[in-house]
Image: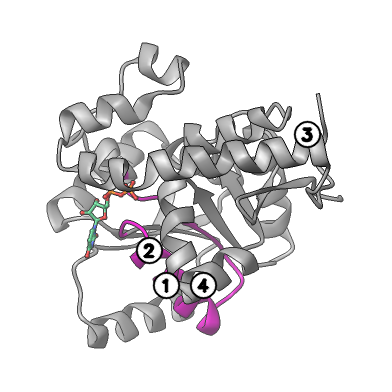
Amino acid sequence: MEQKKEKVLGFDVDLITLKDAVMLLSEKIKNKQGVHVVTINPEIIESAKKNNALKKIIEQAQLVVPDGSGIKLALMFKGIRQERIPGIDLAFALLEMANDSNYSTALIGAKPEVIDKAAAALQSKLKNINICYKQDGYFDSEKENIIINDINNLKPDIVLVALGSPKQEFFIKKCMEKYSNAVYIGVGGTFDVWAGVVGRAPYFFRFIGCEWIYRTYKQPERLKRIYKTLPLFAVKAIIEAVEFRFLRKGDNNGKQT
Ligand code: UDP
């Protein structure tokens, strides 16, 4: 299946629905084809622009889905309608599929008490879920090698990595060098939400695509990250869209609405 993509500030973003992403990943698991899924947002783009290693990882990822509303808006400026695919929703939908298909899952990241609670919450929601490995996200480089060896020995079908960005992207790259036959997703603060430690934004905020406003209200320390990246991202996205729409500079194969 030819995957439609469109560039956002120089990064390919897959134009796909959540449902199709799960179907695609399910096929990949069946065929034992490894996939690194990046759930991209303006913060990751801005940090990748300053970090070549991160940029390369994103460019090499087999699936890049638009997590942040900023990415959705940047595509909208170009006239492309694309739903937002929050990492937390994609990860849960994938686990629902894994629950039905008997696929195994490794969970890596978050604080020790959080990962235990998150795993327990998943097990109570998804009765057949096979969590073959869980590991908190606070480890040194020696332990990191042990974790990677564990993953290589256990050979899970899905590996969810919740270390925050860009730590999780670097971990996934390293782990895939040893064991590449799984679907790996960097899921940020997802385990905190599943554990009930951090609340998911109320439906209204999710509906208007502004979950970040709620998260910033709950965790004001995020404000620094946001104001450093969002205004600059917005300006660049508008310039790119103007070029795309009026000068047709975009080397895209994305669909237009
Ligand atoms: N985390 C971790 N190890 C670290 C740093 C962070 O496991 O060394 C976890 C942290 O406990 C939290 C997640 O990574 O669960 C980061 O969440 P955040 O909301 O910052 O990620 P975002 O969704 O913004 O990428």
Q: Please tell me which residue is depicted at 30% across the width and 23% down the height of the picture.
A: 201
Q: Secondary structure at mark 4?
A: loop
Going from N to C along the chain, the mark reached first, 4 or 2, is 4
Residue 5 or 157: which is nearer the viewer? 5
Q: Position of residue 109 (x, y in %)?
A: 28, 59
Taking 19 as reference, is 204 above or below it? above
- Circle nearer the N terminus (1, 3): 1
Q: CA distance from mark 3 to mark 2?
A: 32 Å
Task: State the residue position of label 3.
Answer: 245
Q: Amino acid at mark 3?
A: Arg
Q: Which residues are magenta?
A: 163-189
Q: Which residue is mark 4?
A: 155
Choose mark 4 or mark 3, whichever is in front.
3
Q: Is residue 80 left or right of residue 191?
A: right
- Residue 31 on image: x %, y %: 74, 63
Q: Determine whether the residue tagged by mark 2 lies in a helix, strand or loop.
A: loop
User: Which residue is more in the foreground, 210 or 105?
Assistant: 210
Image quarter for residue 23? top right
Residue 104: which numbered mark, if any? none
Q: CA distance from mark 4 to mark 2?
A: 24 Å
Query: Which amino acid type is marked by label 1?
Result: Phe
Q: Is residue 115 left or right of residue 65?
A: left
x, y percentage for residue 225?
A: 27, 47
In this view, the residue in front, 111 or 216, is 216
- Secondary element type, mark 1: helix
